[in-house]
Image (cartoon, helix red, strand yellow):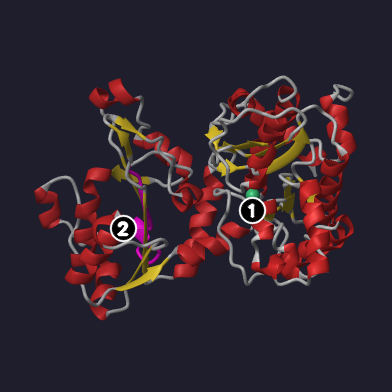
Amino acid sequence: MRAMLSPLFALLLTLPALAAATDADEYAARRAEVMRRIGPDAMLILRSPPLQTRNGDVDWPFRQEDSLLYLTGLDNPDTTLVLVPGDEAHREIVFTLDSDPAAELWTGRIPSFDEVSKRSGVTEVVSETRFEDFVRAAMEGRAWGDSASYRSFATAGLPNWVQKRRDGRAVVWMIQENRHFGDDASAEQHLVERLRRSYPELQFRDAFPLLTDMRMVKSPSEIATVQRAIDATVAAQKAAMRRVKTATHEYQVQATIEYTFRDQGACCWGFPSIVAAGRNATTLHYVTNNDPIPAGALMLTDIGAEVAGYTADVTRTYPQNGRFNPEQRAIYAAVLRAQDATIAMMKPGAHMRDLHELAIKTLGEDLLQIGLISRNERDQVRMYFPHGLGHDLGLRVHDVNDRTQPLAPGRIVTSEPGIYVRAADVRANPVFLALPDAERAGIDAALTKYADIGVRIEDDILVTTDTPTNLSAGAPRTVADIEAWMAGETP
Ligand SMILES: [Mn+2]
């Protein structure tokens, strides 16, 4: 699969780093599918999130709402998409920022309406200042236009829509995931509440499940974009494995990773880098990355570059000095074997929950051999592997998914088993404490031997009709490959 796509990648690499791999026709096709699903009585409204203040005059970097990006490719703030499948003249409208030379002096160029139209494929592009007027005009059967006289004499802007509203058939679709009320209410929530008060006959539907269903299976252009993010991440893992040999602190390895992301053309990370040395690797979401790196310790780097809105998510664990010691090697081999077993099963029809159970059972076999558990029982394994096996990957690092659906070709999912030996936690665990004395004594000895070892291995797997494709296979993964790469024996 990688070989097959490589001419496309060569082409993509010649484009500016942030250019979307998806073209306007594909965005148009996605919107057409949304309109087919919501039907002629619907209006869908998707809005950008507001800019968030970091402190003083400084904002957090802007991130477009995922589904708005998915349907338009537009990554600017103050963007709204409206779809009205039943009104021929205004089926698709984008509201966006006006050009503003005074503002552009400070914050950079605002794309012209023409550029917005070319990128998204939406022909009707309108100033975002007219969105409120549009909503009122649509609901009340007025025209909406630039001048008052135009409004007075023109016919209704959305004649079908207003009739459906009066008949009680009209349905407004908005994303209502993570809905908050009161002071935390989103702009969407305020709009819903206002519309509900003014037009009690309107119906409202949450667009999130529909968009989740569409976004789960990735198109070829999405797969190519995720691969670009993964390639930058693989390069960062390889650089980190070499850097750690002379680094004294975690942040130096983090710097090498994030330098590589940018150097490879990724905009940024898709989630904060986890760069954990020694026992910090047993903290699942360790992100402070400030500690010294003990000599010979294991280094765990769980990282993902982001390209055109899509993120990678790859974890590698490797010894600071380039050689696994016997205890590290034993734990590593167990995690690798569980990962191999689960990746092989990532085929159409499989359920992630079953693969999670497979990982628990496989890890249990080795944990029993190692002596960290006394019987291969789920509760005992969970003392060392407390998280899930994996997740979908896409516009979010934990991408939208419907857990009732089995895997299908075009899904990209991670496999990330781990073993974390937190000896004090295990000794205080009710599962451990309930064991007979002899079993506890055996585990206790193993805990001392393997204390503070944390290993996670994570790859990004494309489900196909046949053998699953490991999109992140370029990052050394076996003990032999990691040691050879760190020794500089492999290019
Ligand atoms: Mn992950």
Identify the disc placed on residue 409. Answer: none
| Crowdedness near tag 2: few (<14), some (14–19) or many (≥20) residues, C-alpha within 10 Å | some
Residue at mark 2: C-beta within 8 A of ligand 1: no
Residue 130 horizontal/vertical position (percent)? 22, 47
| Residue 76 in the image: above or below residue 179 | above
Mark 1 touches mark 2? (CB < 8 Å): no
Viewer-proximal residue, 11 or 400? 400
Which amino acid does the dot numbered 2 rest on?
Answer: Glu
Magenta region includes residue 82: yes
Give the Cα separation between the discs numbered 1 and 2.
27 Å
- Residue type pointed to by label 1: Lys
Quick one: SS at disc 1? Answer: loop
Between 485 and 44, the one lying in front of the other is: 485
User: According to the image, label 2 marks what residue?
Assistant: 188
Relative depth, front residue between 469 and 94: 469
Which residues lie in the magenta part? 78-92
For image coordinates 25% across by 51% down, the residue present is: 131
x and y, in percent, of residue 311 in the image: 59, 42
Disc 2 is placed on an element classified as: helix
Determine whether 347 is above or below 119 in the image: below
**Residue hosting label 1:** 218
- Label 1 environment density (alpha carbons within 10 Å; few <14, some 14–19, many ≥20): some
Foreground mark, 1 or 2, reads: 2
Q: Is 27 displayed left or right of 88 in the figure?
A: right
The reply to whether residue 317 is visible in this rendering is: yes
Q: Quadrant of the C terminus?
A: top right
Residue 207 screen position, x and y as percent: 43, 64
* Magenta stretch holds residue 175: no
Residue at 26% across, 28% down: 100
In this view, 167 is above or below 211: below
Question: Splitting the image into 4 quarters, where does residue 55 fall?
Answer: top left
Residue at position x 82%, y 46% from top?
332
